[in-house]
Image (spheres, helix red, strand yellow):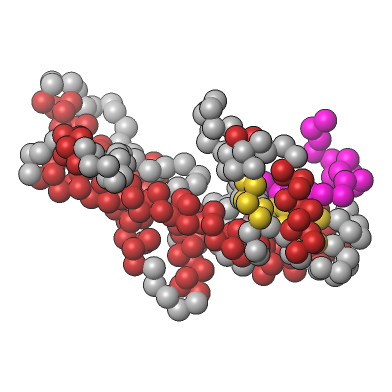
């Protein structure tokens, strides 16, 4: 039964955290929802309980950012009194074919024994099966690169669209021709928005930069995709003008606000 009262989950032994992990105005990870949820759970955490995080984060976030909060507000010791796991959320909103149970689930635990326990828990409802990662960090990284890879691939075809537009070549025609080769990846150009693909690469980039490495490919892909809103809006305005459709009264969205 859905509830907003933390007392109603006090008897639980396994807690699964699925909260938003956005970025702030400077494109830095905003962990406020994650930290708030950890504080709340800590108030009812008991010995032998397990906290599983599903929110997309950078590798190391669960153990470096969430666990200290759980310890501080519960008074319990990690991997002695309570345990953690990470199993990245895998869902395609609106997709009636690829549903929660039909998408293979990556799982992990803070100890080998807890990893097996968490894996068995998910295995009981995921018909597609599970993949038990060797550590929480590996599971976190697997989710981060899933969306970063897709973002980079889309940015490539978006850049092609920008180039071909200047050459008066139809990008769809070019992609259709290239797609006749068996190993060509059929990505399509367009806007990249939402709370996953347009955000998650910044989490991976943040971690990389904290370690002294500048992720040039990831960030350049983000830059291209962030600027596509202006390109699309400009194309629409040109088409409207050409067709004699009045532009006055229409709202213009800057890509940084729209995406």
Q: Position of residue 245 (x, y in %)?
A: 18, 21
Q: Position of residue 162 (x, y in %)?
A: 18, 46
The answer to whether 211 appears left or right of 181 in the picture is right
Tell me if residue 5 is in the magenta stretch: yes
The answer to whether 161 appears left or right of 152 in the picture is left
The answer to whether 84 appears left or right of 246 in the picture is right
Residue located farthest toward the left when viewing the structure as drawn: 167
Residue located farthest toward the bottom when viewing the structure as drawn: 212
Q: Nearer the viewer, residue 60 or 222?
A: 60
When the figure is inspected, residue 114 is found, relative to residue 54, above or below; the finding is below
Q: Position of residue 59 (x, y in %)?
A: 58, 65
Q: Position of residue 81 (x, y in %)?
A: 88, 65
Residue at the spot 16% in from the left edge and 34% down from the top edge: 173
Question: Which of the 4 image quarters holds residue 168?
Answer: top left
Q: Quadrant of the C terminus?
A: top left
Q: Tell me, yes or no, if residue 35 can be seen here.
A: no
Q: Tell me, yes or no, if residue 159 can be seen here.
A: yes
Q: How many marks?
A: 0
Q: Nearer the viewer, residue 37 or 220?
A: 220
Q: Nearer the viewer, residue 100 or 206?
A: 100
When the figure is inspected, residue 87 is found, relative to residue 134, above or below; the finding is above
Tell me if residue 169 is in the magenta stretch: no
Residue at the spot 13% in from the left edge and 21% down from the top edge: 243
Residue at the spot 49% in from the left edge and 66% down from the top edge: 206
When the figure is inspected, residue 50 is found, relative to residue 244, above or below; the finding is below
Question: Which of the 4 image quarters holds residue 60?
Answer: bottom right
Residue located farthest toward the front when viewing the structure as drawn: 182
Q: Quadrant of the N terminus?
A: top right
- Look at the image and give the residue range highlighted in magenta: 1-19
The answer to whether 233 appears left or right of 242 in the picture is right
Residue at the spot 76% in from the left edge and 48% down from the top edge: 120
């Amino acid at each position: 039964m859905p509830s907003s009262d933390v007392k109603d989950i006090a008897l639980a032994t396994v807690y699964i955290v699925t909260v938003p992990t956005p970025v702030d105005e400077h494109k830095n990870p905003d962990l406020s929802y994650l930290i708030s949820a950890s504080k709340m759970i800590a108030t009812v955490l008991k010995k032998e309980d397990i906290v599983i995080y599903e929110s997309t984060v950078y590798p190391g976030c669960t153990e470096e950012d969430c666990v200290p909060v759980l310890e501080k507000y519960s008074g319990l010791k990690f991997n002695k009194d309570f345990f953690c796991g990470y199993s990245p959320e895998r869902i395609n909103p609106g997709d009636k074919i690829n549903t929660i149970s039909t998408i293979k689930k990556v799982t992990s635990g803070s100890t080998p024994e807890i990893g097996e326990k968490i894996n068995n828990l998910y295995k009981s409802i995921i018909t597609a099966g599970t993949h038990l990662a060797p550590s929480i960090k590996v599971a976190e990284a697997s989710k981060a690169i899933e969306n970063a890879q897709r973002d980079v691939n889309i940015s490539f075809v978006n850049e092609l669209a920008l180039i071909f537009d200047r050459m008066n070549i139809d990008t769809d025609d070019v992609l259709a021709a290239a797609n006749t080769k068996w190993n060509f990846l059929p990505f399509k150009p367009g806007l990249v928005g939402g709370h996953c693909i347009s955000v998650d690469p910044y989490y991976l980039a943040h971690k990389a930069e904290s370690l002294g490495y500048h992720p040039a490919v990831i960030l350049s892909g983000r830059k291209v995709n962030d600027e596509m809103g202006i390109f699309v809006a400009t194309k629409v305005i040109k088409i409207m003008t050409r067709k004699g459709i009045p532009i006055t009264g229409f709202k213009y969205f800057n890509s940084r606000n729209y995406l």
